[in-house]
């Protein structure tokens, strides 16, 4: 069975984590498939938005813990898989100049929770939840969790989530600003699809630069951010979509963006 289902339709590249019997936990094969899928998202101009979800009742239960050797003869480097798998994945997701929508369909635990938070716009089903499960097995948050959580929810909530490994409901995740929206279970995929299609029909160049601006703001002073806005506005002006946007406004019609 393919650990990741990938399909392209209407400018939306869909990634469905597909290891439902293990709540879509990350295996080496899944990491390899995500690398390939990311390559396609980066290189294929027909891809104008990525939509991520999970097959079955879970979104992703983090690292696959089944079959782990708990009495290894040699010391184990738990940082190695971060270096080769999770860290490059998160950095590539953030650098992708196209929006990534995430539809969290069920439990998102450990690296699975933080993989969701690495996406640009996150919707979750009301029955879904987020668990910083690391502490339960004596680890620390990874896959960007220690970066995303304090920025999204504040230090106090980040600390308590990470130290207790308590389950956070989708509703609270939305209330705390961790995610964009909590929706009824039956509405999750229709809403996520609608959003992804709208983004895929949007001014892709502008969306990519919006992403760059918003993420850069976390490390910038106001002056630097204003300069960045000037640079990005210049860059977007080198493209075609803004002309179509203004023409459509003046002609009182819907714009038809080409993503250029
Ligand atoms: O070296 C490195 O990899 C370092 C990197 C670490 C990154 C991390 O993500 S560490 C955190 C790893 N994840 C966890 O600790 C979460 C483990 N899972 C759970 O705590 C629970 O399964 C959940 C809270 C996520 C869901 O609970 P529940 O009751 O809804 O489902 P369940 O019955 O526990 O799980 C269903 C099946 O999925 C079950 O298999 P079975 O018994 O039906 O054959 C279970 O073993 C399997 N499963 C769940 N999580 C994982 C998993 N199999 C492998 N790896 C998992 N992470």
Image (spheres, helix red, strand yellow):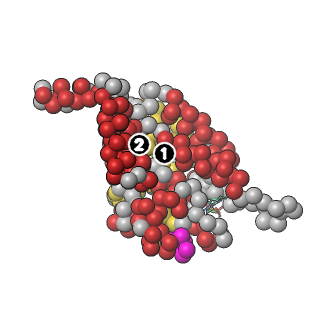
Q: Which residues are magenta?
A: 161-165
Identify the image quadrant of the C terminus: top left
Name the spot of residue 115 as percent of width and height, x first.
52, 53
User: Closest to the observer: 236 or 36?
Assistant: 236
Q: Is residue 198 magenta?
A: no
Residue name at image x 34 percent, y 49 percent: 223
Up/down of 169 relative to 8, above or below: below
How many residues crowd mark 2 within 10 Å: few (<14), some (14–19), many (20+)?
Answer: some
Cβ of mark 1 under 8 Å from ligand 1: the answer is no
State left or right for residue 60 relative to residue 180.
Answer: right
- Residue corresponding to mark 1: 94
Is residue 47 left or right of 195 when viewed as pictured? right
Mark 1: give few (<14), some (14-19) or many (20+) Cα within 10 Å. some
**SS label for mark 1:** helix
Look at the magenta stretch and give its main secondary structure.
helix
Residue 212, numbered circle: 2
* Residue 108 % position (x, y): 51, 60
Q: Quadrant of ligand 1?
A: bottom right
Is residue 135 placed above or below 78 in the rendered structure?
A: below
The answer to which quarter of the image holds residue 140 is bottom right
């Amino acid at each position: 069975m393919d650990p990741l289902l990938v399909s392209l339709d209407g400018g939306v590249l869909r990634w469905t984590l597909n290891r439902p019997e293990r709540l879509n936990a990350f295996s080496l094969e899944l990491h390899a498939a995500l690398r390939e899928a990311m390559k396609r998202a980066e290189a294929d101009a027909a891809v104008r938005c990525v939509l991520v979800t999970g097959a079955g009742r879970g979104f992703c239960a983090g690292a696959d813990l089944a079959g782990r050797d708990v009495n290894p003869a040699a010391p184990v480097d738990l940082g190695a898989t971060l270096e080769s798998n999770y860290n490059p994945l998160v950095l590539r997701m953030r650098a992708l100049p196209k929006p990534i929508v995430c539809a969290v369909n069920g439990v998102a635990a450990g690296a699975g929770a933080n993989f969701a938070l690495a996406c640009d716009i996150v919707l979750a089903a009301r029955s879904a939840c987020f668990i910083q499960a690391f502490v339960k097995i004596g680890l620390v948050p990874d896959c960007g969790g220690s970066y995303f959580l304090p920025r999204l929810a504040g230090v106090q909530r980040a600390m308590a989530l990470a130290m207790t490994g308590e389950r956070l409901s989708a509703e609270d995740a939305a209330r705390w600003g961790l995610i964009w929206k909590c929706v009824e279970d039956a509405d999750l995929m229709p809403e996520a699809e609608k959003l992804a299609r709208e983004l895929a029909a949007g001014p892709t160049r502008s969306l990519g630069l919006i992403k760059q601006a918003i993420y850069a703001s976390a490390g910038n002073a106001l002056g630097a951010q204003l300069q960045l806005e000037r640079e990005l506005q210049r860059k977007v002006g080198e493209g075609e979509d803004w002309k179509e946007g203004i023409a459509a406004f003046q002609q009182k019609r819907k714009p038809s963006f080409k993503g250029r």
